[in-house]
């Protein structure tokens, strides 16, 4: 057993004694094992059952999922298998004419799924999106919003506009999902379904970080990016920190893009020379999932732009009194302006409804997006998909998009009585916005074995413009 890259022989000894471990505990002093196995600072959580078999093998630690897996060990045999017969009947009733398809979440995945279902199914089948928010938010543009390149209303669309396309929208929070009774409950009503697509994304949990509310500005929601923009407009120099509080987080490129856009903003404002820009992250390199070449190339850009990079930053809490961010080991850092990526969790309704997997997220077939419940699919950030290298498919809109199309096409095939063929192949792409009208681009196959195969294209102006065009297309196409 080895423990974290910051441990010493002495702390290992203490561990061994404290937990009376019968085997050797050694420090991974140069971080070799950590770099090979981790997405963040917790390389693997392994749970061994009473019979000595490995029950759980995850590359991050999510307490809720871990607890669910532990509970399963003590579950009475047969406890989980209740009321299977009514499921079959309800599902059969949905075949043919008049199926009720519910899509939970009107984010990236939900929108795409609704579009493809509506395009392919006759009007007799009812397609409904439920979302607690009235608007769809194109999240990639939050970073432009933060630096004043977009207004909030330019990056959102009312979900009620979907009515024009023949998709019903219900603006209510989903509070329970009962897959056995094939029914969901919102704050106001119960709705039966024949097919369900769960596209609820990842929940942001800034409240889990001590001091976040008092000092950090949330880089991942529209209220936060409005505050960042206001703060940058009055900023006259000082130290700006971009902090990743926890792993996993959506869009692995976003904190790097944020730092580069802030750098450009400060240069344009003429205060860059009086300022420092820092990135603090638990990752050992930028975008570790895309491989060392990608990490090296982003690191070079950061260096060139004089952005100071603090990898393996084991963030613990924020101390607003002296404006510092505090790691579990190493030096705290004082910052004047703090832009932060909050912890991400599976939506509460997933935990309440018992749909959470041992990873702390939903588990699906990586090609079909089917859950273990017939006619129930899950797509996008709410899922945990394990790759050949043991790491997880990153949370990104591009994957939510392709997965949504697959789920929709499979449901259409089921309704039409043909064999579902659509399959997600793990391909994806992303832009890396550099500021100053330039962007990089990367594309590849994340399902490649043994490692994702991602090709990196050098920064150019046309990549930035293709990102702008994609944003415009996205905000028109689905509505
Ligand atoms: C700053 C930033 C930059 C990004 N840049 C990129 C990028 O360049 N490229 C890329 O591919 N991805 C990017 N992403 C990631 C991308 O936006 C997400 O991965 C994508 O939106 C996930 O889609 P989803 O459908 O799974 O979830 P979401 O789009 O998050 O949608 C989930 C929806 O569910 C709703 N919801 C949640 N809980 C409930 C409930 N209980 N009841 C009702 N409704 C509920 C939410 O309101 C939300 O509308 C970025 C994200 C951020 C924050």
Image: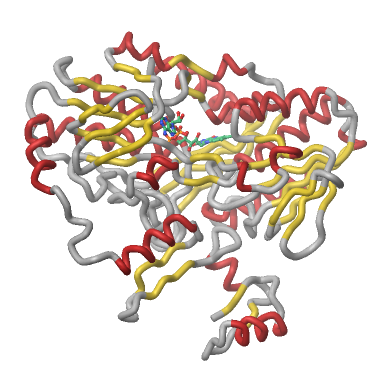
Q: Quadrant of the C terminus?
A: top left
Residue appearing at x 54%, y 41% in the figure: 251
Q: In the displayed structure, would residue 442 be above or below residue 284? A: above
Residue 450 makes an appearance in the image: yes
**What colour scheme governs how the chains and residues are painted in the rendered image of this protein?**
secondary structure
Residue appearing at x 45%, y 21% in the figure: 474
Q: Nearer the viewer, residue 226 or 30?
A: 226
Q: Quadrant of the N terminus?
A: bottom right
Where does the image place residue 193, in percent across and percent down from the top left? 20, 31
Judge left or right: residue 413 versus residue 290.
left
Where does the image place residue 290, in percent across and percent down from the top left? 53, 52
Residue found farthest to the bottom: 22
> In the picture, residue 219 is in which quadrant?
top right
Residue 305 makes an appearance in the image: no
Q: Nearer the viewer, residue 72 or 364?
A: 72
Q: In the displayed structure, would residue 78 be above or below residue 197? A: below
Residue appearing at x 85%, y 24% in the figure: 234
Where does the image place residue 146, in percent across and percent down from the top left? 68, 27
Residue found farthest to the top: 164
Counting labels gives 0
Q: Nearer the viewer, residue 343 or 242?
A: 343
> In the picture, residue 240 is in which quadrant?
top right
Where does the image place residue 427, in percent across and percent down from the top left? 39, 44
């Amino acid at each position: 057993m080895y423990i974290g890259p910051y441990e010493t022989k002495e702390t290992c000894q203490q561990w061994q004694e404290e937990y009376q471990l019968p085997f050797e505990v050694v420090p991974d002093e140069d971080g070799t094992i950590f770099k090979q196995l981790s997405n963040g600072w917790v390389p693997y959580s392994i749970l061994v059952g009473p019979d000595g078999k490995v029950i759980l093998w995850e590359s991050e630690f999510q307490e809720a999922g871990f607890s669910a897996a532990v509970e399963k060990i003590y579950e009475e045999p047969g406890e989980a298998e209740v009321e299977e017969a009514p499921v079959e009947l309800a599902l059969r009733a949905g075949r043919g004419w008049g199926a009720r398809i519910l899509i939970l979440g009107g984010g990236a995945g939900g929108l795409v799924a609704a579009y493809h279902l509506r395009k392919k199914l006759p009007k007799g089948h009812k397609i409904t999106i439920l979302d607690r928010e009235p608007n769809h938010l194109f999240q990639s543009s939050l970073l432009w919003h933060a630096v004043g390149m977009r207004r909030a209303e330019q990056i959102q669309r009312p979900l009620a506009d979907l009515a024009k396309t023949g998709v019903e929208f219900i603006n209510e929070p989903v509070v329970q999902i009962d897959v056995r009774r094939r029914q969901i409950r919102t704050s106001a009503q119960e709705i039966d379904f024949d097919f369900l697509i769960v596209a609820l994304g990842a929940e942001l949990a800034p409240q889990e970080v001590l001091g976040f509310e008092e000092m950090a500005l949330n880089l991942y929601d529209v209220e936060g990016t409005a505050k960042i923009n206001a703060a940058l407009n009055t900023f006259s120099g000082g130290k700006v920190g971009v902090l990743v509080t926890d792993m996993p987080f959506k869009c692995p490129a976003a904190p790097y893009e944020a730092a580069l856009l802030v750098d450009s903003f400060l240069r344009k404002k003429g205060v860059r020379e009086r300022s420092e820009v820092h990135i603090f992250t638990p990752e050992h390199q930028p975008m570790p999932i895309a491989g060392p070449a990608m990490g090296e190339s982003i690191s070079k850009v950061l260096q060139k732009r004089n952005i100071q990079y603090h990898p393996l930053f084991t963030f613990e809490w924020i101390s607003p009194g002296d404006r510092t961010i505090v790691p579990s080991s190493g030096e705290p850092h004082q910052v004047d302006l703090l832009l932060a990526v909050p912890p991400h969790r599976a939506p509460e309704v997933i935990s309440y409804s018992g749909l959470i997997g041992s990873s702390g997220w939903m588990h699906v077939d990586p090609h079909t997006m089917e859950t273990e419940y017939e006619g129930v699919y899950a797509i996008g950030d709410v899922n945990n998909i394990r790759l050949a290298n043991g790491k997880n498919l990153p949370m990104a809109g591009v994957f939510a998009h392709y997965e949504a199309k697959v789920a929709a096409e499979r449901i259409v095939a089921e309704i039409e009585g043909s064999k579902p063929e659509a399959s997600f192949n793990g391909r994806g792409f992303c832009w890396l916005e550099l500021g100053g009208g330039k962007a990089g681009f990367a594309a590849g196959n994340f399902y490649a074995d043994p490692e994702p195969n991602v090709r990196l294209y050098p920064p150019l102006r046309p990549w930035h413009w293709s990102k702008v065009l994609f944003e415009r297309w996205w905000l028109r196409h689905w509505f």
